[in-house]
Amino acid sequence: MPASEKSLIRRIRQLSGKPGVARIPLGIGDDAAILRVPPGHEVLVTTDLSLENVHFRRDWHPPESVGHRCLARGFSDIAAMGGQPIAAFLSLALPATLPQKWVDGFLRGLLALADQHGVVLAGGDTAQSPGLGSSANILADIVVVGSAPRGEALRRSGATSGDSIYVTGKLGASALALEALFAKPKTRLDPKKYPGHFYPQPRLAVGRYLRDRGIASSMIDLSDGLSTDLHHCCCERRVSAEVAAERIPRAEGATLEHALHGGEDYELLFTAPGNRKIPRRIAGVAVTRIGKIKSGPTRVLLLEGLRSQELAPGGWEHFRNPRRSP
Ligand code: ADP
Ligand code: MG
């Protein structure tokens, strides 16, 4: 059973980073937190739900991984805008029967990632999840507040004809792990062998680098899958994209399918003018050119050798993929 609401909040308050730092005069404990945005910046806000049996399963994912992934999703959105996270807010609905050990593990995972990026957990809400026994599910909602210099945050909509398309890191690691989990639902995977799935690293430093130097014309994080997320970018500006299959960097063991349609890699996809020189590594992360943007109609073409075929968005979409969860 988790500790009572009051003692749980007390515990979270003890574990979370120290407010009082320049950007957070007031954190957990009052009716609202107070945040300070650096002069000349504007506020970025993102929110992401992590639902048991949709985004994770208690028998597949250790609580530390669930906490890490919960915050990584929010950080990755801020990274995709080229922003700097300032504070996180965590709303939890927990089943009455959930062991406190699980909650502690979840917080450990979440707060370790927050710490790694110097971000404080500045508030949230705590409630009991409805339902009895195994029908009561865990729900965690993360809000991340960040900032970027006014008018400079990178959007999905800036890709124009002639731009090159790049991705960071390697793709397909998360889908590869999910496939292994679905294949043998009763066995546990060693998170150390599948870090891309259990502990994805949001690319905050890369995102900031690209924004800071005015390199990227558009950017998005790969949360739903390359095919789907690239479509999002093309739709915003009514342009088309051409991607070369053999250039897509794949995680070890991942197939082209995993890399194209698997979500939750949390790498960055960005476009930059074709004549712009892009470092091969940024902040220690590989950057690979995978294709180019052309004028409309809105579509993504996949080039494989001499063949070219239209790539339909095949990544994750809620209410459309009833079979696959989490
Ligand atoms: P209120 O009734 O005003 O919502 P609460 O008793 O719910 O206040 O919360 C007290 C303080 O604890 C607030 O600062 C709130 O932001 C914080 N808090 C509550 N739940 C969480 C949580 N899950 N994570 C982080 N902070 C929390
Ligand atoms: Mg409350």
Image (cartoon, rainbow, N blue to C red):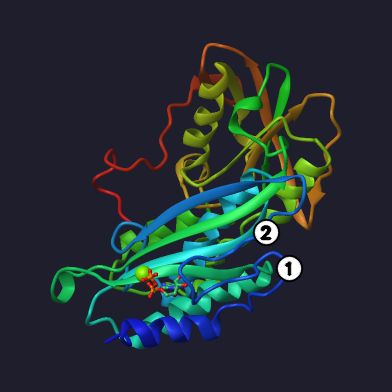
Question: Does residue 109 show up?
Answer: yes
As drawn, the residue found furthest toward the left would be 132
Residue 293 locus on image (x, y percent): 65, 21
Q: Quadrant of the N terminus?
A: bottom left
Q: Do callouts 2 and 1 mark residues in contact (Cβ within 8 Å)?
A: yes
Image quadrant assignment for residue 7: bottom left
Residue 49 image position (x, y, % from top left):
39, 56
Q: Secondary structure at mark 1?
A: loop
The part of the image, by quadrant, that contains residue 150 is: top right
Residue 142 percent location from the top left of the image: 46, 60
Residue kind at label 2, given as amino acid type = Arg
According to the picture, the residue beneath numbered tag 2 turns out to be 36
Total numbered circles = 2
Observer able to see residue 169: no
Relative height, residue 13 to residue 86 (above, below): below
Task: Compare marks 2 and 1 and give the one earlier in the sequence.
Answer: 1
Residue count near mark 2 (Cα–Cα under 10 Å), binned few <14, some 14–19, many ≥20? some
Q: Which mark is residue 22?
A: 1
Q: Secondary structure at mark 2?
A: loop
Between residue 22 and residue 201, name the one nearer to us: 22
Drawn side of residue 180 relative to residue 300, left or right: left
Q: Amino acid at mark 1?
A: Ala
